[in-house]
């Protein structure tokens, strides 16, 4: 059994990393929330957002962004790094049989999660628990950064005041 | 339980263990690395610098860059924090948790320098350097058997059926998360990702700074690196090494063509935001 970790290590070192998916078709959003914008940007000209697990139909790519064709309006863009092919998205299997079938199809991802973190916090004692509370407080303080439409407006004001982007001087 | 762990491992090996961590998995590793960064070497909690206005300002600079980068979305977005340390340092933890020390901020002279340093760290996230590092660390511990491809489905199954981890798996995962985060924090805060990755992050950082939606002056990154005290240069401690890095940044700036001018309004707001540190 001790050979297994060694084999895994060797294979992990020699096998290539997963390439960025460049196929069109139905993709699933893998982040908590992803911006939709009229230009390839996650901060400018936002028109909305889509939540984790939403399906979107991709018709092409521009740099780091994927183009979504809409029947009721102009095309919009979404960060391609926020998407995974539908067949690779980890759904919640309803029972053990379904779980084994899905496992057979091969899925990415893993299993560090709130339960693991809670156990680690308990094991590491009060000072580390305070540190995790510090991380929680940090995330809470910066919750405003997850209000995407408001953030977009605020960043525009920030760029304008600092003469950045379209408000700047290019030499 | 053991009955299915072996097939899962076989599947993981067969499909290539070098595969990516999921966005959410990366986020949890990043949280643990961040918690580690908030304690001093003696294990005492030090936390982040308490100036909320400064933290907010740094987040605005960072997000201006991050949201125009190649990876504008991470599982729960980017976070920017100021570490209570006199060392001159900045680093990115998996998932988009970005730290800059009080020591580094004191050494900076403008918003463009701050943007340059943050762009470098954001580039590490774009290039998935923290994740590669965490993957390697997990692989070295033989953890891929429980972090592998099929296990995600098992995880989702547990979630869907309301069952928790088995005690055996939870123990392995807890040790794995702790060890991965510990090793990662140690290497990250002291060594960085290695020269090749650092140069790649410089290059991508410069390109992002010059993008239409950003347009910070990329000379800021160069100016800050040139000013680094020798003890804080890490792998770039020797003069030729540092010169080579600066030359590489210069070459990338030339490739970018036109660049934005430094604006006094930006420098003024940087000075105002960091006044409490000086």
Image (cartoon, coloured by chain):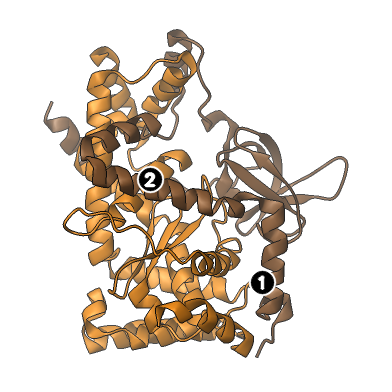
Provide the residue designation for mark 1: A158
Chain under callout 1 = A
Tell me the colour chain A is drawn in.
Answer: brown
The residue that appears at 42% across and 63% down in the rendered structure is B50
**Residue A140, x across and y down, in percent:** 51, 48
User: Which residue of the protein is positioned furthest toward the left in this rendering?
Assistant: A2
Circle nearer the N terminus (2, 1): 2
The span from disc 2 to disc 1 (Cα, nearest Å) is 30 Å
**Residue A42, x across and y down, in percent:** 65, 57
Q: Is residue A16 visible?
A: no
Residue A150 as seen in the image, left or right of residue B5 = right
Image height of A18 relative to A62, above or below: above
Residue B253 as seen in the image, left or right of residue A116 = right
Q: Is residue A26 visible?
A: yes
Towards the viewer: A14 or B108: B108
For label 1, the SS is helix
Towards the viewer: A166 or A5: A166
Tell me the colour chain B is drawn in.
Answer: orange
Image height of A99 relative to A24, above or below: above
């Amino acid at each position: 059994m001790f050979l297994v970790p060694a084999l895994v290590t060797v294979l992990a070192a020699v096998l290539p990393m997963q390439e960025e998916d460049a196929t069109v078709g139905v993709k699933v959003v893998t982040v908590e929330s992803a911006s939709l914008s009229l230009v390839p940007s996650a901060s400018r000209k936002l028109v909305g957002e889509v939540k984790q697990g939403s399906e979107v139909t991709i018709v092409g790519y521009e740099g780091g962004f994927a183009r979504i064709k809409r029947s009721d309006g102009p095309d919009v863009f979404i960060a391609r790094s926020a998407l995974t092919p539908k067949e690779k998205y980890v759904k919640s299997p309803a029972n053990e049989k379904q779980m084994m079938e899905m496992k057979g199809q091969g899925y990415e991802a893993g299993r560090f999660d709130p339960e693991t973190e809670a156990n680690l916090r308990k094991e590491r004692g009060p000072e580390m628990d305070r540190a995790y509370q510090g991380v929680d407080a940090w995330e809470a303080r910066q919750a405003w950064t997850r209000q995407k439409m408001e953030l977009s407006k605020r960043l525009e004001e920030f760029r304008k005041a600092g003469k950045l982007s379209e408000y700047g001087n290019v030499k | 339980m053991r009955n299915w762990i072996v097939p899962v491992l076989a599947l993981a090996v067969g499909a290539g263990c070098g595969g990516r961590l999921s966005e959410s998995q990366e986020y949890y590793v990043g949280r643990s690395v961040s918690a580690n960064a908030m304690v001093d070497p003696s294990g005492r909690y030090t936390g982040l610098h308490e100036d909320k206005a400064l933290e907010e300002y740094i987040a605005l600079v960072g997000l201006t860059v991050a949201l125009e980068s190649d990876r504008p979305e991470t599982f729960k977005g980017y976070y920017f924090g100021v570490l209570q340390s006199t060392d001159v340092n900045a680093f990115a933890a998996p998932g988009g948790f970005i730290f800059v020390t009080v020591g580094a901020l004191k050494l900076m002279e403008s918003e463009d320098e701050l943007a340059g340093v943050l762009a470098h760290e954001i580039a590490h996230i774009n290039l998935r350097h923290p994740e590669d590092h965490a993957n390697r660390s997990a692989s070295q511990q033989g953890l891929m058997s429980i972090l592998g491809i099929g296990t995600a489905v098992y995880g989702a199954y547990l979630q869907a059926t309301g069952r928790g981890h088995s005690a055996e798996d939870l123990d392995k995962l807890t040790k794995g998360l702790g060890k991965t985060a510990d090793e990662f924090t140690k290497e990250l805060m002291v060594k960085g990702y290695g020269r090749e990755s650092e140069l790649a992050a410089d290059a991508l950082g410069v390109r992002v700074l010059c993008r239409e939606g950003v347009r910070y002056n990329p000379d800021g990154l160069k100016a800050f690196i040139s000013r680094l005290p020798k003890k804080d240069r890490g792998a770039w401690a020797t003069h030729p090494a540092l010169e080579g890095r600066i030359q590489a940044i210069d070459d990338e700036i030339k490739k970018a063509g036109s660049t934005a001018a430094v604006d006094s309004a930006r420098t003024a707001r940087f000075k105002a935001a960091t006044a409490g540190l000086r």
